[in-house]
Image (cartoon, helix red, strand yellow):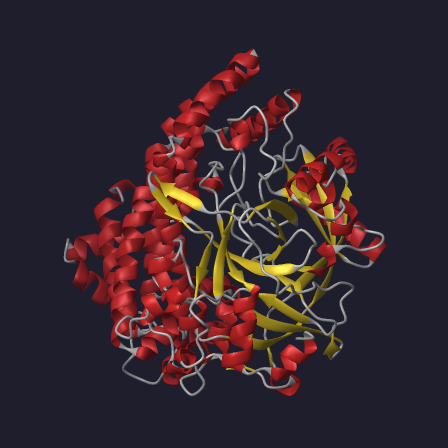
Amino acid sequence: MSLALGLCLLPEVRADEGMWLIQSLDRALEKNMKARGLKLGAREIYNEEAGGLADAVVSLGFYCTGSMISEDGLLITNHHCAYENVANLSSPEHNYLEEGFWAQDRSQEIPLKGETFYFLKRVLDVTDEVEALRASLQAEGKPSGSRRLAAILEKKYSEEYGMEASLTGMWSTAKYYLCLYVSYSDVRLVASPPVTVAAFGGDEDNWEWPQHKADFALYRVYDNGEPLHPGRHLKISQNGYREGDFAMVLGYPGSTNRYASAAEMNQDINVERPVEDYLRDHQMEIIRKWMNADPAVRLRYSNAFFNLTNVAELQKGEGECMHRFDVIERRRAWEEGLRASTPENRALVDSLNLSYAAVADIERLKVYYRETLVRAMQLGQTLMRMGGAGRDATEHQRDLLAQGLAQTDPRVEKELLAFSVKEFFNHMPGRYLTPFHRQLQEQFGEDFDAMADWIWEHSCVADFGRKPESEVVAQYAGPIDEDTLYRYIRELSIAVLNTEEDALAPSLRDLRHQYVVARYEYLKEQGVPQYPDANSTMRLTYGRVLAMEPWDGVYTHWQSTARGLREKYNPANYDFAYPEAFARVLPPPDFPVNFLTDLDITGGNSGSPVLNARGELIGLAFDGNKESLAGNYESVDGYNMCVCVDIRYVLWVIRHLGQQKYVLDELGL
């Protein structure tokens, strides 16, 4: 994904770089945007008193972004943001993932469970109030940590304004903002294309360009049982765009790490990442094999596998880009200026380097702990949740077990367990093993398949696959902490590794905090405009519709067309085999499908509206390109791109595949 603390390497910020706080649209930023082609004023974009475009932009539980596109609560976002909801609504009889879902009137819209959408109404700078409150609490000898401060201030402002309040620290708490939201939990599914249309190209095309995805879904937000009438909704433009045209995104980017030190980057990319890549590759290989062999397994694991592959490909590409663009070495070179600025900053950078080197081996072991125990199996995560329910919560534990069994398959889980056991015992030093793990090692030695079989057969899931799931759940007697599979997963406490890390580098967390603050102050003194790391608060980023040269001598166009849908189609390859019903309604070959911009986005921006110079909706952001994947740490000029689905293609699919006349009528189309 992307963002921009290429600030750290450049004497000036490029005009179209950065994820700017929505409440910080000042005259200088407005001037830069207008120089790129913006036809609006800053207060037409965000205006607490009179309202602006930002009022139409919605956070979907702070994991994705959507936007209101009608007076009656119709909301558009990415299909991959709706993926889990669609999967949960699907069954073998009504597989909405594979077949798609198209309500034909409002009575057919399906309510969702567990969703809350948030509309930003106001942002307050409360930095001085936070500091005064912290000082007051400390003077009284009371706790004054971030959670305590947030609890006090969020309660105060929530009661004062009658809205949900969220306190957020920026630049490692150099500044504090309090965001006020109105939220709605009555959300219903309106439209979802088949996954092979929405995610045409699948894993192979993910993070690539060109792409040809109809990555959209429609929800409707309800208020007290009636469609919500939002204060603002976006106007849809069907006039298209040209190369070089102004474009901007409003959304809720999740997280970046652009203020990281070179030492922290090195640990992430060169110490931890190789282990993560190796383990996840093998886990995906196991799940993919069973998904390809059995459609029922594909349905059960579709969401988990989607998430696993997306993260794995992102992280692998990130590592490649970090090396290709010398990001760590460039950050080290920049840090020489920081070191030279004051004796305190010199000592700070040197201490960080020494501390990260000291804990490298411990951090590598933590990855093995996370990936072979905590995240190794889908059922393992179910058992961990059961353990968190407590000894006296048997019925709740049974409900969790029922959910876990319904979402998994015993053949897949047993093979994942066998892989986990082998990798854990081959890499975890004996001094960290609990008595239970030592007992397993003494009993089975290196016969890891036999060890995994024994763990499974003595667990509450032993009959999973041999008996109906309801019987497996009914015979569970607990308590979970005596279960062999749970003990295998749970008994190695991460606290052991944390304690050893603290002994080697007791102040590493404080050093990271000091580094971010020092970096912020250093750039501030140089007069460099800054924006904080992404943290799920509303941001604006702007740029242009733009072609790309990903490698020397390779040029890619700024737009893909329906010709690519025909060229890539392959009925023998699931990812490139859209349904016959879609083949009958393909757009003309020159019809626009996806387009490319240099907008600065990251996770959480998925589904964000892409707007033209007049603030009209021309598409949705849904992906980055492989060359942009160093963007968590640094924006690389010329490679930091955003892949978008054209709103005209979205409307074509709604009209010709979904045949949703009532939706098109509502949109005035």
Q: Which residue sits at x=64%, y=54%?
A: 612
Q: Which residue sits at x=47%, y=17%?
A: 336
Q: Position of residue 37 (x, y in %)?
A: 66, 44
Q: Nearer the viewer, residue 563 or 506?
A: 563
Check the picture and name the quadrant holding the C terminus: bottom right
Give the side of residue 61 with respect to residue 197, left or right: right
Q: Which residue sits at x=69%, y=35%?
A: 175
Q: How many numbered tags mark residues here?
A: 0
Q: Position of residue 474 (x, y in %)?
A: 41, 82
Q: Which of 533 and 530 is in front in this view?
A: 530
Q: Position of residue 613 (x, y in %)?
A: 67, 51
Up the image or down, 499 lies above or below 166; here it is above
Up the image or down, 589 lies above or below 17; here it is below
Q: Nearer the viewer, residue 5 or 365?
A: 5
Q: In which quarter of the image is residue 422?
A: bottom left
Q: Which residue sits at x=55%, y=76%?
A: 654
Q: Quadrant of residue 616?
A: bottom right
Q: Which of 290 and 357 is in front in this view?
A: 290
Q: Position of residue 153 (x, y in %)?
A: 76, 46
Up the image or down, 194 lies above or below 316; here it is below
Give the side of residue 626 with respect to residue 111, left or right: left
Whether residue 207 appears in this view of the structure is: yes
Up the image or down, 354 lies above or below 52; here it is above
Q: Quadrant of residue 650?
A: bottom right
Whether residue 362 appears in this view of the structure is: no
Give the side of residue 398 with respect to residue 164, left or right: left
